[in-house]
Image: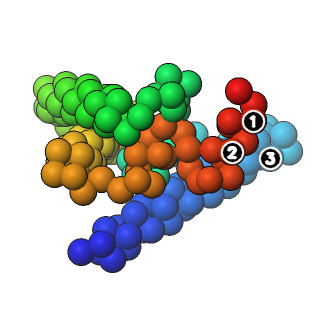
């Protein structure tokens, strides 16, 4: 099961690379065309914006798995294991609530987005904003699973330390010296 999950996230990372590369090519190509020939490709302008939306929302899920989102660890790092677990569960409950609201909002807007079309490519805007389903389910599921690992005692010491901003012994030692 873990290999399947690892494969899924590796595929997402590859997709992020492709989206970013396509954005760079389209935007750079348009800059060159505008500079040299005073023209551009309208489709690339629109698609690069949509790719940026997808890149951001898919990237949020990938980064959450690695516990690399911005966090305020200055308080949490001072707690013991019990305090860290309480903070972790509280923040994950908040994440689940936000994901539920985000999913519901995406659901409410789906009909409007499905009947609204992009001006140049004429694709349904549901293809652009529907990524909210993926993000809300992905982030919410990871938060729920982490809550369950805390409650069942299967949370690793490494995960708990990463939540507090201590990614390894060397980082922890550097932080202690700075304080």
Of pointers 3 and 2, the one earlier in the residue sequence = 3
Q: Is residue 157 left or right of residue 28?
A: left
Q: Quadrant of residue 140?
A: top left
* Location of mark 3 (residue): 32
* Location of mark 1 (residue): 177
* Residue 153 coordinates in the image, percent (x, y): 22, 52
Q: Residues within 10 Å of mark 3 (few under 14, many from 20)?
A: some
Residue 32 appears in the picture as rendered: yes
Label 3: which secondary element = helix
Q: CA distance from mark 1 to mark 2?
A: 6 Å
Label 1: which secondary element = helix
Residue 121 appears in the picture as rendered: no
* Location of mark 2 (residue): 173
The disc placed on residue 143 is none
Label 2: which secondary element = helix
Q: Residues within 10 Å of mark 1 (few under 14, many from 20)?
A: few
Q: Is residue 27 left or right of residue 95?
A: right
Q: CA distance from mark 1 to mark 3?
A: 50 Å
Q: Residue at x 26, y 42 (%)?
A: 143
Q: Residue at x 73, y 48 (%)?
A: 28
The colour scheme of the drawn protein is rainbow
Q: Is residue 127 left or right of residue 47?
A: left
* Residue 109 coordinates in the image, percent (x, y): 19, 27
Q: Nearer the viewer, residue 161 or 133?
A: 161
Q: Residues within 10 Å of mark 2 (few under 14, many from 20)?
A: few
């Amino acid at each position: 099961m873990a290999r399947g999950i690892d494969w899924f996230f590796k595929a997402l990372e590859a997709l992020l690379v492709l989206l970013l590369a396509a954005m760079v090519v389209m935007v750079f190509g348009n800059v060159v065309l505008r500079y040299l020939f005073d023209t551009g490709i309208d489709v690339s302008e629109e698609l690069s914006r949509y790719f940026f939306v997808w890149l951001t929302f898919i990237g949020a899920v990938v980064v959450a798995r690695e516990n690399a989102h911005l966090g305020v660890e200055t308080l949490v790092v001072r707690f013991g294991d019990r305090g860290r677990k309480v903070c972790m569960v509280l923040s994950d409950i908040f994440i689940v609530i936000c994901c539920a609201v985000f999913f519901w909002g995406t659901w409410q807007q789906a009909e409007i987005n499905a009947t609204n079309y992009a001006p140049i490519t004429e694709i349904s805007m549901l293809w652009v904003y529907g990524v909210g389903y993926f993000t809300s389910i992905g982030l919410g599921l990871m938060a729920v699973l982490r809550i369950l690992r805390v409650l069942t005692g299967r949370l690793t010491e490494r995960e708990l330390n990463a939540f507090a901003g201590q990614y390894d012994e060397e980082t922890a030692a550097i932080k202690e010296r700075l304080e």
